[in-house]
Image (spheres, coloured by chain):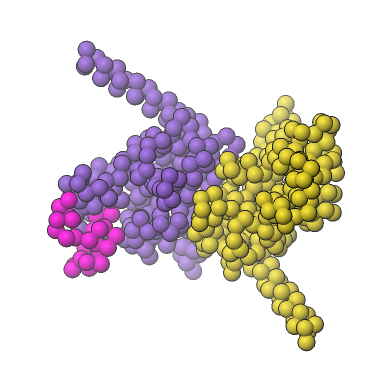
Chain colours: A purple, B yellow
């Protein structure tokens, strides 16, 4: 009976996901756009007792991730860039993607334009929705975070970071687009490098910011569809022409 | 000496405005776009002691503007739609524009695309920047408001309202665009009718919302340039084709 209930639950989940996928496709009607359903993760970074990796790092007296690279002896090594966990890992920039995939199980998607469908927007802060996005020969980290900067008033912050250096990041422009109910909100900016900390980008407010009422206007049945596009920036093109 | 100081101050103001105008034109480089410098007005609506009109309305026991039209006996008469003052005026929709121009001295601008340059963004909340915009045979009211929804954390809210009925408003789409420092933020929506209250649009958060840090990223020397465009909406076009 338990087996049957679980199977039935799984089938219902699949139908629900399929339905959400269809709705997101309808909103972003451009053909060939990949819709990726992203489930939330309750941020464990600031709750080390619940996270073995974080506990280890705290016991070893390692600084939180934002300051890791300042404390590293080999300048070629960078700390783990996962926004979810305080992880003691460090390694070369080239292997950050495989670390994020294998250790933190962050999905990676291909394609110039994708739709990021964040589910369960109602979950309490702090919560993160994270994927990697492979495009134009580089990998990007997309972070949607629900956070309470002012107590009792959660906001949503969305940003895209290049898994590369700040100089490489300057060559790109990313666009995040929300589109529903005859309303459209677009944010375009140069991605930051993952060597800068996602926490500081969000605390600076230099990203797409949505208060709860605006997020509800764009959400459909508790899910938020964000259209993502990455292009090489004009500055880069102009330099290439010269 | 006082005369000289005042004249000199006025000349400096003119030079400053001219410089701001040039900068706004540079940001929104499309030829033929009209740049309108909009000075702030400290909102007097909720400070009746400082506003004769509001005082009169309070003394007469008239409801605040949002509820005025519910209390009106002649259904063809609407209350004053000025977001700044609690004004006891009421009249037909056709004469709202001339009332706003003559009594509340709100400027009106022509053109499909204009740049709204709000000065002195640093002034404390509550502050409003308001103009009327004449376009496609209709008049619109653009309101930028600095308001503290959460104490100590002012935010900026921008919306466009049609001086017309909700049915007429459904035929249009307005776009507000901020563009500076390799960042771009666009908000597109159907304008609300002035028969709905601007206060409720802002409290619902159904408008362009900027927190202070984001507003500072887009501001230039204390001024915020907002590109405005109004088009007839696609639904309207599709209906016209049928």
State which region is magenta: A55-82
Q: Residue at the front extreme?
A: B59
Residue at the (71%, 37%) spot, across then down? B67
Location of residue B231 with respect to B17 vertically, above or below: above
Residue B85, position as x, y percentages in the image: 73, 51
Residue A57, position as x, y percentages in the image: 17, 55
Res A40 quadrant in image = top left
Residue at the (58%, 40%) spot, across then down? B204
User: Across the whole image, how many numbered discs are drawn on residues?
Assistant: 0
Residue at the (43%, 59%) spot, across then down? A204
- Residue A190: in sight, yes or no? yes
Q: Quadrant of the N terminus of chain B?
A: bottom right
Q: Quadrant of the C terminus of chain B?
A: top right
- Residue B168: in sight, yes or no? no
Q: Nearer the viewer, residue A73 or A95?
A: A73
Res A191 quadrant in image = bottom left
- A61 falls in the magenta region: yes
Location of residue A189 with respect to B232 vertically, above or below: below
- A188 falls in the magenta region: no
Residue at the (62%, 50%) spot, across then down? B158
Location of residue B74 with respect to A185 vertically, above or below: above
Residue B79, position as x, y percentages in the image: 78, 41
Res A58 quadrant in image = bottom left
């Amino acid at each position: 009976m338990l087996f049957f209930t679980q199977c039935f639950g799984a089938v219902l989940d699949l139908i629900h996901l399929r339905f959400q996928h269809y709705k997101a496709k309808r909103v972003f009607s451009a053909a060939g756009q990949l819709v990726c359903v992203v489930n939330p993760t309750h941020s464990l970074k600031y709750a080390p007792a619940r996270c073995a990796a974080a506990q280890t790092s705290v016991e070893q007296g390692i600084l939180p991730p934002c300051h890791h690279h300042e404390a590293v002896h080999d300048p070629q090594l960078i700390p783990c860039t996962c926004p979810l966990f305080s992880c003691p890992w460090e390694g070369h920039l080239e292997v950050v993607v495989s670390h994020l995939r294998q250790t933190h199980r962050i999905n990676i998607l291909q394609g110039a334009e994708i739709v990021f469908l964040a589910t369960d927007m109602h979950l309490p802060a702090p919560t993160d929705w994270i994927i990697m996005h492979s495009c134009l020969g580089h990998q990007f980290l997309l972070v949607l975070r629900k956070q309470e900067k002012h107590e009792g008033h959660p906001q949503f912050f969305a940003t895209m970071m290049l898994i590369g250096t700040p100089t490489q990041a300057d060559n790109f422009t990313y666009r995040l687009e929300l589109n529903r109910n005859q309303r459209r909100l677009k944010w375009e900016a140069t991605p930051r490098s993952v060597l800068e900390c996602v926490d500081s980008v969000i605390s600076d407010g230099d990203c797409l910011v949505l208060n709860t009422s605006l997020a509800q206007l764009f959400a459909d049945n508790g899910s938020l569809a964000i259209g993502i596009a990455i292009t090489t920036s004009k500055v880069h093109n102009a330099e290439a022409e010269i």
